[in-house]
Structures are given as structure tokens and as C-alpha cells.
Amino acid sequence: MIRTDQTTLAQYLIETCRDPDHHADEALMTLLIDVARACKAISKGVAMGALGGTHGKADTMNVQGEDQAKLDILTDEVFRKRTEFNGCVRAVASEELDDPCPVPDGYPRGPYLLVYDPLDGSSNIDINVSVGSIFSVLKAPGAADKPVEEADFLQPGTDQVAAGYAIYGPSTMLVLTLSRGVVGFTLDPMMGDFVLTHPEMRVPRSTSEFAINASNGRYWEDPVKAYVEELIQGASGPRGRDFNMRWIASMVADMHRILMRGGIYLYPFDTKVPGRAGRLRLLYEANPCAMLMEQAGGACSTGRERMLTVQPTELHQRIPLIFGCAEEVAHVEALHAAHAEAGAGQMFETPLFNSRSLFRDIPAAPVGRV
Ligand SMILES: O=P(O)(O)OC[C@H]1O[C@](O)(COP(=O)(O)O)[C@@H](O)[C@@H]1O
Ligand SMILES: [Mg+2]
Ligand SMILES: [Mg+2]
């Protein structure tokens, strides 16, 4: 059937670019169209499954000491090759590249930096569970001929000009923010177009669903232990209602669920790997997620501060990540603050919230039905 009533991603971006109230320029729009082309190619590759010959490990490690899947490497190349030629970027940086990668000699140098995780949740590929790609766009600082350095990328999340992700699930979607709310496009596999299907994605204020890898429980800090204990106690605890739990182990897929129906996701600080501040990476996982969450009415925090105001210190910096419904995130922050006030290192009592609990006066825990 021929349709004339659909808005494609290209149309949406051109219209945004024409809007005089918006900062978007042609280079940014072109870059986002090329990112979408990369995501389409990855979507095809992922959908081939075992037939594509790309399952399994690559026998290599990334700079963070993680085993790379064959598709981690391939999708990284797709992102880079589809975006470096267009005169819109000056350099890219990725989970899979040790250092920033300037555009090759001979290509025009653009005004933007692109940072991405080309395949998020890669432990899920071989078992045919949803994975995604996630990206962030920053302005490139300094003159166009300035040599690219790591410091160029160390900008707080508030400086992002665009962020988004693609999810490769039963359908492929591209979800995007240009600081004017969050919009979602679904890939029409017949036409090859991303079509606007979710013009205003909003995270509800409250939730009864949480996502955390509970097998790390013994390594968490007390405020997180206390929070999860509250949720598990459900109707018989201080929250007065039951909570449900979901964990896909693919942050993009967990984030997508939260954007669609609410929830809270935590990959908090833990002591599992000494010296590691968290599991997820600030520049290409936490920051784009934070921009999307805030633009959709949700929140994103380290537990101690708003994610978007964290000053990055390293390209592959890890960070505790807590995001989702604003009320829940605020409550987790309040637990961290109460813990700090009571004196870090002092153990909280369990069961929590009993008459002598250090948490007993903490406000803002939404009680009762949502
Ligand atoms: O293996 P765990 O502890 O469940 O961690 C899963 C988390 O790690 C990640 O897979 C990290 O992303 P990568 O696959 O890009 O390394 C997240 O997507 C996910 O939420
Ligand atoms: Mg990832
Ligand atoms: Mg990855």
C-alpha cells in the first residue's frame, strides 16, 4: 500500500532544521541521517542471526579489558565508515576504539564529535535477545584545523546537542532527542525508511517496576541495598505496594521499556571490581541516556548528582547509573544523601525503616498504588 500520511526521519529532521527557534543546522541533520543509515545496516546484520556468520567472540579485547564479540567490531566499523565522510564530524569515539578517531585525511572536517556504543548488550546477540546502539553528538571545540585530542570529548552531558539510540528488537526503532522532547521512529523494513510512530515519548512520574542485576547485591553500597530491600518487601514494607522486576542485560532495551511504560534502572556503584566506579560508560551510555530521560520527563543520576552535570575526566570513564521515573530517582538520591549525612561507613540496620532506622525520615518515597 502506498502511504502519503507518514513522516519519515529525513522529513522530521529537515523540518526541525527549518525551524528558526531550533539550533539544529544542516551538518547536524546530515550526521543524524548517516547515523540512522548505520543503524539500518546494523539492524540488517543483527537480523541475519546465525546465518550472518557474525555470531561469537572475536578473540580480541577492547581498551576496557572486555572480550569483544565479532559484531562489536563490525558494528563499530559501520558507525565510523557511515559517518566520517560526510563533512559533518571532526572525530568519532567509541566503546570499541582505544582513542578518538579523527576523520581520515582527504575528508572534510565537520563541526561535530560523535560518540557511540555501536552494539549495546552484546552478550545478548548469540541468544537472539534485543540489543541496541547508542550515541551522543557534541560540538567540536576550537578551530576546524585543530588536532583532535581526548580532551575535546570531555564535555558534560549538558553540552550534548543530540542523543539517541536504535533498538534491534521484534521491530527496529530509532529514538532521538534534539532538546525538544523525545521522538521515536519505527523502521519500515519494506521501504527502508524510519517512520515517525512515537511523536512524544514521556516517562511517567511514578512506577512499580525496577531493573537491577541483583546478583551484585553483596557489592552494593548501603543506600542501594536499602532501596532494593524496600522494593522487595513490596506491599508488606514501607512502600505499601508490590514492585515487579525486569532485567534484559541490554541497557538500551531496558531504557526503551522505561521510556515506553516507566520504571527505574540501576547499575549503581559496586565493589565487585576494585577501582571500577560503575559498569556503564559516561560519555556514550550514561550521558545520551540522561539527555533522553530528562527530555522525556524522567531523571538520571549517579545517586549523588545529576548525570548531565558530571564533568568527564576520561574517554572511557565508568559511572554509577540510575535512571527512569523522576520520583523514584529522587528517592534513591535522597537515600544516598541520608547515608552521607549519617556518616559513610556507618552500617544501616535491617530491616530498614524500623524505629531506629537511619532512613526513617526520608521523604518522597511514593507509597501506595501507582
Ligand atoms: O552483565 P550485566 O552485569 O547484566 O550487565 C549488563 C549491562 O552491561 C551492558 O551490556 C554494557 O554494554 P556493552 O554490551 O556495550 O558492553 C549494558 O547494556 C547492560 O545493562
Ligand atoms: Mg553498552
Ligand atoms: Mg557495546
Image: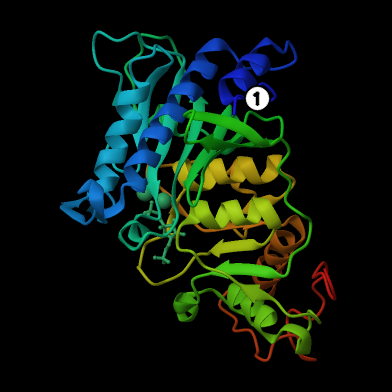
Q: Quadrant of residue 324?
A: bottom right
Which residue of the protein is positioned furthest toward the left in this rendering?
59
Which quadrant holds the N terminus? top right
Check the image and report above or below for 136 versus 251. above
Which quadrant holds the C terminus? bottom right
Image x and y of residue 71, in percent:
27, 46
Q: Is residue 153 left or right of residue 7?
A: left
Residue identifier under label 1: 7
Which residue of the protein is positioned furthest toward the front in this rendering?
1
Q: Quadrant of residue 195?
A: top right
Name the foreground residue: 256 vs 109.
256
Element under disc 1:
loop
Image x and y of residue 202, in percent:
74, 46
Image x and y of residue 167, in percent:
49, 46
Check the image and report above or below for 363 versus 168. below
* Whether residue 335 is visible: yes
